[in-house]
Amino acid sequence: MKGRDAFACAFLILANSACGKSHADARTTVRFWGLGREGEVVRELVPAFEKRHPEIRIEVQQIPFTAAHEKLLTAFVGNSTPDAAQLGNTWVPEFVSLHALAPLDARIARSTARYREDSFPGIWDTNVVDGKTWGLPWYVDTRLLFYRPDLVAAAGVRWPPRSWGEWRAAMAGIKRLGGPGRFAILLPIDEYEQPVIFGLQTGAPLLSSGGQRGAFRDPRFRQAMAFYLDLYASRLAPGLDRQGLANLYQQFAEGYFAMVITGPWNLGEFRSRLPAAMQDRWATAPLPPPKEGMPYPGLSLAGGSSLVLFQHARHPEAAWQWLEYLSEPAQQARFYELSGDLPSRPSAWQLARLAADPKTAPFREQLLHVASPPKIPEWERIATRVAECAEQVMRGGRDLDSALAALDADVDRILEKRRWMLDREKGARR
């Protein structure tokens, strides 16, 4: 009797296990790739989604940022892309050109979420290529000024500045007070973002002929680069690259420099790395425009990551439900609490009370005045050359005009294949 009971119990256990496995297998599995820490943090949002959608299972794979670009390209070539992924905004044009992504316009039109209306316009625009929308903004970043209010106040100038002239006057005053060995601003010379931001502010096109040639000799970009390089020549900024900086937070606290152009990832870093006595001695402010009377603040770069659906997703409908969930204001506010990444939807800022934080609020103001760099796959290679060009001039290797001419020549070479492909497409349409 006992043997039969044991056999019956074993049979029931096996049957229940099989049923459980069958139930799990019956769910639709959505494969999602998250990059860097976001790929870890987003797992915290999965249980609530699966509770709401018990028929869907989310499988998150975390990809290191350093390997993400290559892994995504390899997956595309091998026809093994996930259903959906996080994608850096500047990567969107490249994956569009590969026909790797699915356009989202029809899905957005059917949604009641009002994505476009509840987004920062410049951030939304980073996902629009060739008139179609390819991603939903997930979290955002841009660059503005982190600064020492005490050192700015000691310089006795109007703050925040409303033009480059006022800003430079403030920097000159800070430098005079600091003396030798101290600087007004930190601008790592190997970062391309600052000269590109100044170029966007002057209205420089950066590229010409529909993104087929360089336009860095344009007078507007020359004006931007001249302003940028003068900050080194006048000893307002140290001639350092990122490797030459010992400890940004310690040197900021010591007054080695009074301001730096950086992004929202440093909000948490400044709060955790600066000593308690310094917490009321740092603040943020939007970037000034070139001239007083121009729209304030001046433009900055639109950055962040978006949520994309791959062209060959196995379960596009279920994947879209997951992307919509991640885009909900409540989930974006929760994601901010978990990661510190700024939400892409202004309504989520209200939920997270970010607009009331005096250190975060300037980011919201700046995010209303951002622009994307040229939307071409080659942009990151070009951006690297912009930084190299600036460093050549700063180090005395070339004068500005010859450096810009060489930059345009290099960019034209980088874009040679692009011109060939576009010419071939035109010929095919004839």
Image: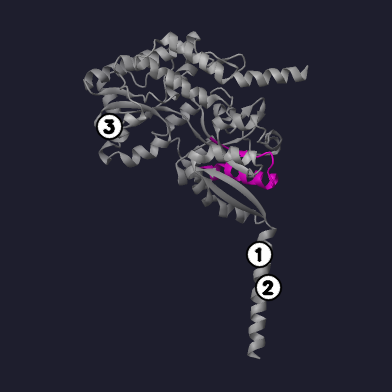
Asked if residue 327 is among those painted magenta in the image, a careful observer would answer yes
Image position of 346 with respect to 12: above or below: above
Residue type pointed to by label 3: Gln
Q: Position of residue 146 (x, y in %)?
A: 36, 29
Q: Earlier in the sequence, mark 2 or mark 3?
A: 2
- The count of marks equals 3
Residue at x-position 56% and y-position 52%:
46
Q: Amino acid at mark 1?
A: Lys
Q: Which residue is mark 2?
A: 15
Q: Position of residue 73 (x, y in %)?
A: 59, 37
Task: Count neighbours of disc 3 (C-alpha within 10 A) and say few if under 14, some if 14 to 19, many if 20 or more.
Answer: some
| CA distance for labels 3 and 1 | 57 Å
Give the image location of residue 246, x and y in percent. 29, 33
Quadrant into which the N terminus falls? bottom right
Q: How is the image coloured?
A: one colour
* Residue 79 vs residue 261, the one in the foreground: 79
Please name the residue that numbered disc 3 is placed on: 251
Specify which label sits upstream in the sequence, 1 or 2: 2
Tell me the distance, in whole angstroms, between the alpha carbons under discs 2 and 3.
65 Å
User: SS at mark 2?
Assistant: helix
Of residue 34 and residue 145, the one placed in the foreground of this image is 34
Q: Secondary structure at mark 3?
A: helix
Furthest residue to the right? 430
Please name the amino acid that badge 2 sits on: Ala
- Which region is colored magenta? 305-332
Mark identifier at residue 107: none
Q: Is disc 2 in contact with disc 3, using a CB cutoff of under 8 Å?
A: no
- Residue 313: quadrant of the picture: top right
Mark 1 lies on residue:
21
Q: Secondary structure at mark 1?
A: helix
Residue 123 horizontal side relative to residue 390, left or right: right
